[in-house]
Image (tube, rainbow, N blue to C red):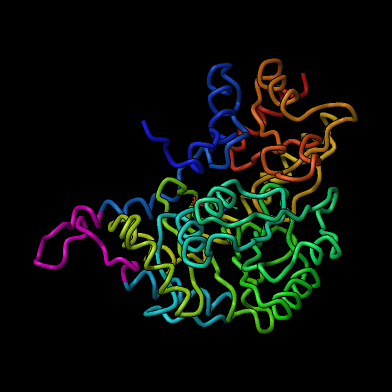
Amino acid sequence: MKPLNHTVTEFKESIFSTMTKLAIDHEAINLSQGFPDFDGPQWIIDLAKNAMDQGNKLGYVGKNQYAPSSGILPLREAISKNYKRFYNLDFDPASEIVVTNGATEAIFCACMALINPGDEVIVFEPFYDSYLASLQMAGARVVPVTLKAPNFSFDSEELIAAINPKTKMVILNNPHNPTGKIFSSEEIKSIAELARKFDFYILSDEVYEFLTYETSHTPTACFEDLANRTITISSTGKTFGLTGWKIGWACGPKEIIKAIHNVHQFTTFCVAHPLQVAMAEALNNMDQYLIEFKADYLKKRNTLVKGLKECGFNILNPQGTYFAMALLPEGENDVDYCKRLIVEKKVATIPTSAFYLKSNEGSKMIRFCFAKKDETLKNAIKNLTL
Ligand SMILES: Cc1ncc(COP(=O)(O)O)c(C=O)c1O
């Protein structure tokens, strides 16, 4: 038989699936994969049920049928309104927003839309694993720049050395998974200066935009001159604790969004219609929810960080996201350590070497997820104390 596609056959099972399977086998508390062990708000779920029940009644276009490929207009309008309200950013719902199946599809479509084989793309490592796969499928050469513990800043000389005339794009994830870092204004301004000088795009993955603790989020597109070369990607999975709904989007200049939509149109075409109806309404009514959401997660972060510190972990305090990294004692290796935690302490975490391509920094750290019920976090800490 003739060989299959050589890029995709090289992809390995994601570390999240591997650790989740191990956690199930050993009945361990799962602080590995990044999703909540509780449901999102019932009022949003009810909105989706209601949209499904409406179906084709009363002759309007069925909510159980295909949605417009770019996303239903009320959802694009709600997204646009929130960017204006929260960040004073202008995205035209008609031409500068496309709704995708989660941020993951937006990332894939953006890579396919912008990259020609041989283009180079800089990613800050540790990085969310879909960047590498999407970039490889698009034929890019991936150039990692390492964020260094404990504060996960990058070395500007390393970044400058990574840039050359083939550099097409930099991927920035802010707030950052897995480190919980929030990039400082100075860091983003220094990337902006290079973007102008060397003419590259910025794909800004901001799915944790509402999970910030001591500071508030500033989208990359807000920085001077960056709106015209930035693709802003976000989604509702983390914000509403509904990761299984996979409603995300890409926003940016209309020529870029048109190209991203061209890819989306021929990969999934559209996003689940009734879920879009519910999300449009949720995004229009999120003020009170956000206050409670942020307070809840702040409490979860503090519970986990305090508890782990008391257990003797060297925790690097996260400023955002729902992850916390721990530096392992000298001589330990992340994969072995995580396996031992599952078997001996019945707590599953993520070995962070999986998030690195170049540096071996990851072998010295593990990642905890605190998007979990208070009870789950307390039980995990109890197990780790024993
Ligand atoms: C940095 C980052 N980007 C994107 C995603 C995926 O988002 P979605 O579930 O909306 O596809 C995740 C999920 O863990 C993530 O951590």
62 in the magenta segment: yes
Residue under the image location 61 percent in, 72 percent down: 201
Q: Position of residue 164 (x, y in %)?
A: 73, 68
Locate residue 81 relative to residue 319 in the image: left or right: left
Magenta span: predominant SS is: loop
Where does residue 82 sit, x and y in percent of width and height? 50, 73
Q: Residue furthest front?
A: 2
Q: Position of residue 353 (x, y in %)?
A: 72, 37
Residue 24 in the magenta stretch? The answer is no
Residue at figure coordinates x 32%, y 73% from the top left: 73
- Image quadrant in which you'd find residue 145: bottom right
Q: Is residue 231 above or below residue 95?
A: above
Image check: 97 left or right of 336?
left
Q: Quadrant of the C terminus?
A: top right
Whole-percent x, y for residue 159 in the image: 79, 63
Using the image as rendered, state which of residue 143 and residue 379 is in the foreground: 143
Q: Is residue 45 above or below residue 96?
A: above
Q: Which residues are magenta?
A: 50-72
Residue at 33% in and 55% down: 268
Residue 107 as seen in the image, left or right of residue 182:
left
Q: Residue at x 43, y 82 (%)?
A: 92
